[in-house]
Image (cartoon, rainbow, N blue to C red):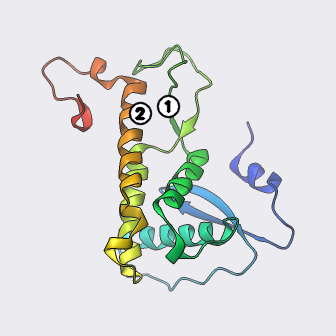
Amino acid sequence: MASFTELVENSNHHPQEKINIETVNNIEITSSSSSAAAPAAPASSSSRYENQKRRDWNTFGQYLRNHRPPLTLSRCSGAHVLEFLRYLDQFGKTKVHTPMCPFYGHPNPPAPCPCPLKQAWGSLDALVGRLRAAYEENGGKPETNPFGARAVRLYLREVKVYYHLSYDYSAALPSGRAKPWGLI
């Protein structure tokens, strides 16, 4: 299996583009930029949350710049946020069984399977929360915030339910206990 660095080095980037590696939810993601990214102000006294929010915001901005055609933040919609979240799935580390997998619904599969690795639901939810806050801190109006769009909220709910069904966590719980995430 190729390492992340090998995948980055072998990816199809234009020679004049600069490859930037950022961290989102403790995973590295790579994007390319033909223009230099704006340097972030050092935040030595900022909290870990503020630092992560700044990195996430910079990464999303870079994603918009690298989008074909490039997007401005004012033209960004919930659909673009969903595209970004799906893009991040390629860097995920959470095995999510598909309905065709023989281990679908089993909390502890006995053998490996070819099901995809995706971002954990909690990571996506936290990322959207940080980006939603960063959008408003950077001058965006709450009513136009693409991270608070109904489509994004529905997507996160669907991901949560799908992951829950993928592992059927209720089978692993003793009877009488509440099901995780308030799902029935």
Residue named by callout 1: 96
Give the image location of residue 70, x and y in percent: 66, 71
- Element under label 2? helix
Looking at the picture, which amino acid does disc 1 mark? Val
Q: Is residue 71 left or right of residue 98?
A: right
61 on left or right of 1: left
Q: In the picture, which quadrant includes the C terminus?
A: top left
* Relative image position of residue 166 (x, y in whole percent): 43, 26
Residue shown at 58% from the left, 27% from the top = 115
Residue at the (46%, 60%) spot, across then down? 78
Neighbour tally class for label 2: few under 14, some 14-19, many 20 plus, Cα within 10 Å: many
Indicate the quadrant containing the N terminus: top left, top right, bottom left or bottom right: top right
Outermost residue toward the right in this view: 15
**Residue at (36, 30) in percent of width and height:** 164
The image shows residue 49, relative to residue 38, as above or below, that is: above
Residue at 68%, 68% (x, y): give it: 66
* Residue in the foreground of this view, choosing between 48 and 167: 167
Helix, strand or loop at mark 1: loop
**Amino acid at circle 2:** Tyr
**Of residues 140 and 15, the one drawn nearer to the viewer in this rendering:** 140
Assess disc 1: are there few (<14), some (14-19) or many (≥20) residues with their C-alpha within 10 Å of its C-alpha: many
Q: Quadrant of residue 171?
A: top left
Determine whether label 1 and label 2 are within 8 Å by CB.
yes
The front one of 134 and 8 is 134
Q: Badge 2 is on which residue?
A: 163
3D distance between C-alphas at marks 1 and 2: 6 Å
101 in relation to 156, above or below: above
Q: Is residue 68 above or below residue 155?
A: below
- Tell me where residue 34 appears, x and y as whole percent: 76, 76
Where residue 95 sits in the image (x, y, percent)? 51, 32
